[in-house]
Image (cartoon, rainbow, N blue to C red):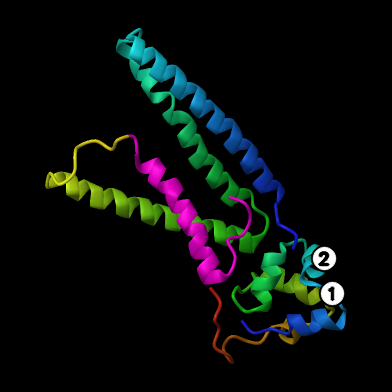
Amino acid sequence: MENRLRVLRAERNWSQQDLAERLGVSRQSVNAIETGKYDPSLPLAFRIAELFERSIEDVFVSPSRHTSKAI
Amino acid sequence: MTHYRSPAVRRYVIRLAILLTLYLVSLFIAVKLFRSGAVTGVPAYALAIAPALPVIGVFWAVMRLLVEEPDEFIRLLHVRQSLFATGFCLSVMTVWEFLQNFDLVAPGNGGFGAAFFWFVGLGFGAIYNRLTVGTAGACY
């Protein structure tokens, strides 16, 4: 699922590890989500959106509008 | 790069170390007693099964890891790895069985049973994750 995670992270000057620690997940998880290889669960997607103080739609692009490459 | 290791993985490693120690000890005792011919009857069955119990324990430890891992992406990698191992093991054992059915290989397994191939499959499963998702996940 396409997303704006890299942009939002860069705006705050956070590394993937920084974001992972704030979310309480692994750096591999952040990388997989950011590169569209893994679609997060709804609870994790909400946590990510809330951390950036955005709505889910502002962070993630609707899969029905874009072809997903996720596993 | 920080290597991810959750409390669930740490528990798994501790359980694995204990179970493998029990396996080696029980196998050593069983081999020694059977070679001496000191055990017969019902105790012989119990002694023969003893090394299998820690191996079954390892299966339990892997399943507990799948339940206890809090990181959903790492958990998915573990599940994919386990499914790959199961498929690999079943495939090898099925081929082996047919080779034996047609007398193309010797009967028996020479000590390499289903558990051995499942654990080998876990290794291949990690490689499969690395190739398809870009990471093998945490230590497993």
Left or right of B103 in this view: B39: right
Residue B49 place in picture, x, y as percent: 39, 25
Residue B112 seen in this snapshot:
yes
Q: Position of residue A26 (x, y in %)?
A: 71, 62
Q: Which mark is residue A22?
A: 2
Percent x, y for residue B140?
58, 50
Amino acid at dot 1: Trp
Please tell me which residue lies in front, A61 or B84. B84
Q: Please determine whether, in this image, residue B27 is positioned above or below residue A7.
A: above
With respect to residue A66, does A21 lie above or below? above
Quadrant where the N terminus of chain B sits is bottom right
Q: Is disc 2 in contact with disc 1, using a CB cutoff of under 8 Å?
A: yes
* Residue that protrudes farthest toward the bottom in the picture: A65
Residue, disc 1: A14
**Dot 1: within a 10 Å radius of its alpha carbon, few (fewer than 14), some, or many (20 or more) residues?**
few
Q: Chain of mark 2?
A: A
Q: Magenta-highlighted stretch: main secondary structure?
A: helix
Q: In which chain is the residue bearing label 1? A: A
Q: Point out the stretch of residues depicted in magenta.
A: B111-140
- Mark 1: secondary structure: loop
Disc ID at residue B77: none
Q: Residue at x 63, y 55 (%)?
A: B138
